[in-house]
Amino acid sequence: MPREIFRIVLVGFMGAGKSTAGPLLAERLGWEFMDADQCLARRTGQTIAELFEGQGEAGFREMEATIIAELHERQEVVLALGGGAIETDSTRRLLSESTGTCVVFLNAPLAVLIERCESQPGAAVRPILQQRETLSERFHSRLQHYERAHVTIDTHGLSPETVADRIMDRLRDGPFHLSSLAGHSSGKR
Ligand SMILES: Nc1ncnc2c1ncn2[C@@H]1O[C@H](COP(=O)(O)OP(=O)(O)OP(=O)(O)O)[C@@H](O)[C@H]1O
Ligand SMILES: O=C(O)C1=C[C@@H](O)[C@@H](O)[C@H](O)C1
Ligand SMILES: [Mg+2]
């Protein structure tokens, strides 16, 4: 029996393209797009860099996990997480225990990810990116969590549009049934 899915959660290291390919995927599905980093910044009135500075990483992770739990209640949504969100146990549990969630891992070689981030405005104040000595270690320790996703897409050399198309292909080919919501009762999924 194909598994019915109500939301797609994009995971992957910074620069993977979650915030860029996410809206393109949502458009293809006719679903809404939500970005955990953007929601957190909007709600607090602070940038992610300011939140890291003011709360420390541990404080940031708590706020991040709270907003992800809230956003994850939605249905017919493509949800882009921040790159480090899966470091939090409760977020990993949320993703693995929800039968209505399809987790998609966007990957690329670390050097490519760093290059993408470095060419963004604000790269100089981007948290984590400047901690070069620990960046590779972080990338590799997070891989074990990213790799638990239901679908993995290697984005290297692909445009964001092609990434969204590839995800659609995998959703069509995989053991998934996309919800239309019509006729469904509400409840935890
Ligand atoms: N497939 C791609 N090919 C080339 N560049 C890309 C691709 N996807 C995204 N980018 C570029 O890489 C940069 C980072 O992309 P994006 O913000 O979507 O990453 P992210 O996964 O959301 O990262 P973060 O974890 O920091 O939120 C942007 O400048 C974006 O234009
Ligand atoms: O990889 C990380 O830890 C981060 C990625 C971004 O999405 C932001 O959530 C923040 O800059 C931290
Ligand atoms: Mg993002």
Image: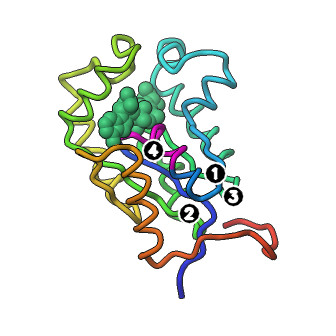
The stretch in magenta equals: 15-24
Identify the amino acid type marked 2. Thr
Query: If the picture is divided into quarters, which one holds ligand 1?
Result: top left
Q: Secondary structure at mark 2?
A: strand
Ligand 1 within 8 Å of the CB at mark 4: yes
In the rendered structure, which disc, 3 or 4, sits on the residue that comes first in sequence? 4
Residue 52 horizontal side relative to residue 181, left or right: left
Residue 173 horizontal side relative to residue 109, left or right: right
Hey, which quadrant is residue 87 in on the image? top left
Density class for disc 2 (Cα within 10 Å; few <14, some 14-19, many ≥20) is many
Pointers 2 and 1 in contact (CB under 8 A)?
yes
Determine which of the numbered discs, if any, sits on residue 75 in the image: 3
Q: Secondary structure at mark 4?
A: helix
In the rendered structure, which disc, 2 or 1, sits on the residue that comes first in sequence? 1
Pointers 1 and 3 in contact (CB under 8 A)?
no
Residue 147 is situated, as x and y percent measured from the top left of the image, at 32, 57
In the rendered structure, which disc, 3 or 2, sits on the residue that comes first in sequence? 3
Determine which of the numbered discs, if any, sits on residue 21 in the image: 4
Disc 1 to disc 3, how far (Cα)? 8 Å
Pointers 4 and 1 in contact (CB under 8 A)?
no
In the rendered structure, which disc, 2 or 4, sits on the residue that comes first in sequence? 4
| Membership of 99 in magenta stretch | no
Question: Which residue in the protein does label 1 denote?
Answer: 72
In the rendered view, would you say 137 is above or below 104? above
User: Mark 4 or mark 1, which is nearer to you?
Assistant: 4
In the rendered view, would you say 109 is above or below 135? below
Most foreground residue, 148 or 117:
117
Disc 4 to disc 1, how far (Cα)? 19 Å
Q: Secondary structure at mark 3?
A: loop
Pointers 3 and 4 in contact (CB under 8 A)?
no
Disc 3 to disc 4, how far (Cα)? 19 Å
Residue drawn at 37 percent across, 45 percent down: 12
